Amino acid sequence: MKRLIRKKRINGVNIMDTYSRYKESVPKELRVNKVEYYKVIRTFLKYMSEKLIDIGLLKLPSDLGVLQIMGDNIKINIDKETGKVKGAVDWNETKKLWKECEECKKNKQLVFYTNDLTGFKVYKIFWFTTTNKLVNKSFYRFKACLPLRKKLAKHIKNGNFTYLYRHQKKKK
């Protein structure tokens, strides 16, 4: 019987994965070493992330689409069957409440994020691929790295969020 050979599924590509492709595509005499390669890539990505946070919109090179920071209203849902509130729990504030109030701890009362500072909006980075020329666009996704998300959160907490695009849902 033939044995089935499973190919390893690639869940994502990061900076470390790109160097091997770089080595294959660039002649040896023009190639730079790994350290220099990573330094250039990180500097470029840092520059792009700073521009994205400063402007709120970034057109990616080679027609790969547009990154845009957009705000949307906080979603807090109430379960119709149990009557429990579902939303993003602020665990720091919840634990403080539980230390102060024993009854709240027994009832497992939760404190939810409200984002009063931003007008009850949650900001996210979206990748718009409508102008992008990739084949099978639905298989690609963008996930911002943790340092970029932290930098965006710090920027918003400092009150620099008024220029950011606010997502408006279409009226039916």
Image (cartoon, helix red, strand yellow):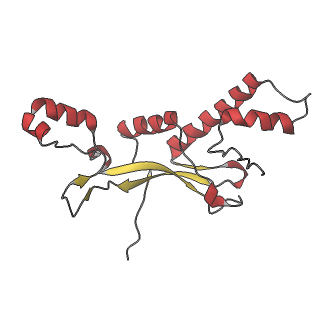
Residue 137 at least partly seen? yes
Q: Is residue 22 left or right of residue 134?
A: right
What is the number of callouts on the image? Answer: 0
Q: Residue at x 25, y 45 (%)?
A: 112
Quick check: can you spot residue 163? no
Residue at figure coordinates x 41%, y 48% from the top left: 123
Residue at the extreme front? 1
Residue 110 shown left or right of residue 134 in the figure: left
Outermost residue on the bottom side: it is 172
Q: Nearer the viewer, residue 12 or 18?
A: 12
Residue at screen point 47% across, 39% down: 149
Q: From the viewer's side, name the closer residue of 117 and 38.
A: 38
* Residue 102 as seen in the image, left or right of residue 167: left
Relative vertical location of residue 25 with respect to residue 68 in this rendering, above or below: above
- Say which residue appears at 38% left-offset and 56% top-offset: 72
Task: Please state the horizontal and vertical placement of residue 128, each as a whole percent of the image.
Answer: 57, 57
- Is residue 99 shown above or below 117? above
Q: Nearer the viewer, residue 11 or 25?
A: 11
Indicate the quadrant where residue 165 lies.
bottom left
In this rendering, the answer to whether 170 lies above or below 4 is below
Q: Where residue 44 sits: x, y (%)?
A: 66, 35
The quarter of the picture where residue 31 lies is: top right
